[in-house]
Amino acid sequence: MALTLPHHARALVVAGTLLFLLGLCQGVVVSMFANPRMGLSAHLTAVQSGMALMILGLVWSNAAWSKVSEPLSFWTTLAGTIGLWLGLTLAAATGASEALPIAGKGHAAPPIVEAGVATMVILSGGLMIIGWLLFALGLLRSNRR
């Protein structure tokens, strides 16, 4: 049985699969990071976010999209998810901890690295919220039709 998906949906499934695979590989080297606890957080984020992107892709066409909301949701969700994983991985590799004090306890990095990680994590979180909110609104609109 062939599963045919619209362009954005297929791209999300592929991106989710690759992120999931990266997370699995990252799990093998968690103990090698400057901050292994943050490395574990990055690993779990990649695996869980990869699954979320795959699921999102599979249900993507159930949302009622406008010309603006569909690409905006696609790109903000994708960029936010990958950006968060990259930010956590950078924090794990460098010891940056200010943006994530629980997983970063006892670690520190130069101020420029701390600022970069904090910017990535905050911006990525905001992008994901926008993308998922647009998707949720699209699902709600599709129920009204």
Image (cartoon, rainbow, N blue to C red):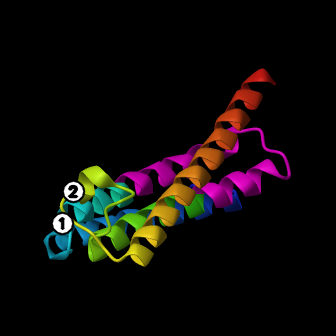
According to the image, label 1 marks what residue? 36
Q: Residue at x 21, y 56 (%)?
A: 105
Residue interval drawn in magenta: 48-77
Q: Is residue 4 or residue 90 the one in the foreground?
A: 90
Q: Is residue 64 magenta?
A: yes
Give left or right: position of 92 versus 136: left
Q: Residue at x 28, y 57 (%)?
A: 41
User: Disc 2 to disc 1, how far (Cα)?
Assistant: 11 Å
Residue 105 is marked as: 2
Q: Is residue 142 above or below residue 80?
A: above
Q: Is residue 136 above or below residue 104?
A: above
Q: Residue at x 40, y 69 (%)?
A: 114
Q: Is residue 48 above or below residue 107?
A: above
Give left or right: position of 43 versus 86: left
Instruction: State the residue lying farthest toward the front.
Output: 111
Residue 133 is marked as: none
Query: Whole-percent x and y of residue 51?
Result: 42, 52
Query: Which element is circle 1 on?
Result: helix
Give left or right: position of 19 versus 42: right
Nearer the camera: disc 2 or disc 1: 2
Q: Is residue 138 or residue 101 the one in the foreground?
A: 101
